[in-house]
């Protein structure tokens, strides 16, 4: 089954404790992306990757890191989480940067 | 100015009516336009995409694109209660970034 998976689905952590949210896709897509979704602000792109070893900042990259060492994986790293990073995070992938994105199930993060 | 703007609603229509959702975008170089549906607590799922000016129909859904006016719309005919959700307009920019509107909440009343 073609899908985008994210782990963990739910995470409660404390300020400053590094965490990684994993994202994996099995569709051989070149383009992968991370979003955060907040009430009233909608979906905002954090980082995106056009291909392996190619990443670019989206609209709200501050406080986040990403890497793309393999085509299928695109982890999101929060080196020192803060409460304002409490949000619902989605990973998405598509064949190219112009085409339909397929979303993972989401990761709900609470930073205390 | 926001990259993508949508009427936040909420929009309520009776079952069987036509629901009209609108979206404007700011980057004239945008090439791809998408409508996603999102149920509460779930991930967005694609309804339609459109690349060229004009109308594109898929079942009960019609997407309309007017690049000169920088306007995208989605019409839902014969609206059903199961169509009740938040509808997200998405646009890709020349830099391959994606921008989403804040969504329009639609309720179809039986």
Image (cartoon, coloured by chain):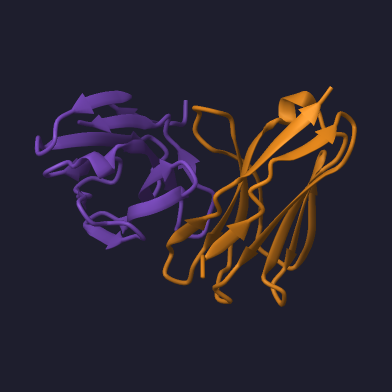
Chain colours: A purple, B orange
Residue for point 33% across, 24% down: A9
Tell me where residue B9 sits by quadrant.
Answer: top right
**Would residue A96 be found to the left or right of residue B83 on screen?**
left
Q: Position of residue A96 (x, y in %)?
A: 45, 56
Q: Position of residue B28 (x, y in %)?
A: 58, 76
Q: Foreground residue, B88 or B64?
A: B88
**Would residue B8 be found to the left or right of residue A108 on screen?**
right
Looking at the rendering, in which quadrant would you find the C terminus of chain B?
Answer: top right
Vertical side of A24 occupied by B92: above or below: below
**Would residue B11 be found to the left or right of residue A69 on screen?**
right
Tell me where residue A4 sits by quadrant.
Answer: top left
Using the rendered image of the protein, determine whether residue B20 is visible from the camera's viewpoint. Answer: yes
Q: Position of residue A66 (x, y in %)?
A: 21, 50
Q: Position of residue A98 (x, y in %)?
A: 51, 60
Q: Foreground residue, A90 or A108?
A: A108
Residue for point 38% across, 46% down: A35
């Amino acid at each position: 089954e073609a899908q985008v998976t994210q782990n963990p689905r739910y995470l409660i952590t404390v300020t400053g404790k590094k965490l990684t949210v994993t994202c994996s896709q099995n569709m051989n897509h070149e383009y992968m992306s991370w979003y955060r979704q907040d009430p009233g602000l909608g979906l905002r792109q954090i980082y995106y990757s056009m291909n392996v070893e190619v990443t670019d900042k989206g609209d709200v990259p501050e406080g986040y890191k990403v890497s793309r060492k393999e085509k299928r994986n695109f982890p999101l790293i929060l080196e020192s989480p803060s409460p304002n990073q409490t949000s619902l995070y989605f990973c998405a992938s598509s064949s190219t940067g112009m085409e339909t994105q397929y979303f993972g199930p989401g990761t709900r993060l609470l930073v205390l | 100015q926001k990259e993508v703007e949508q009427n936040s609603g909420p929009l309520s229509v009776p079952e069987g009516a036509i629901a009209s959702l609108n979206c404007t975008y700011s980057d004239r170089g945008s090439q791809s336009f998408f409508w996603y549906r999102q149920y509460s607590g779930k991930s967005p799922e694609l309804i339609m995409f459109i690349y060229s000016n004009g109308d594109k129909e898929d079942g009960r859904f019609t997407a309309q694109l007017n690049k000169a006016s920088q306007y995208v719309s989605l019409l839902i005919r014969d609206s059903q209660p199961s169509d009740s959700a938040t509808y997200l307009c998405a646009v890709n920019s020349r830099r391959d970034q994606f921008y989403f509107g804040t969504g329009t909440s639609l309720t179809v009343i039986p």
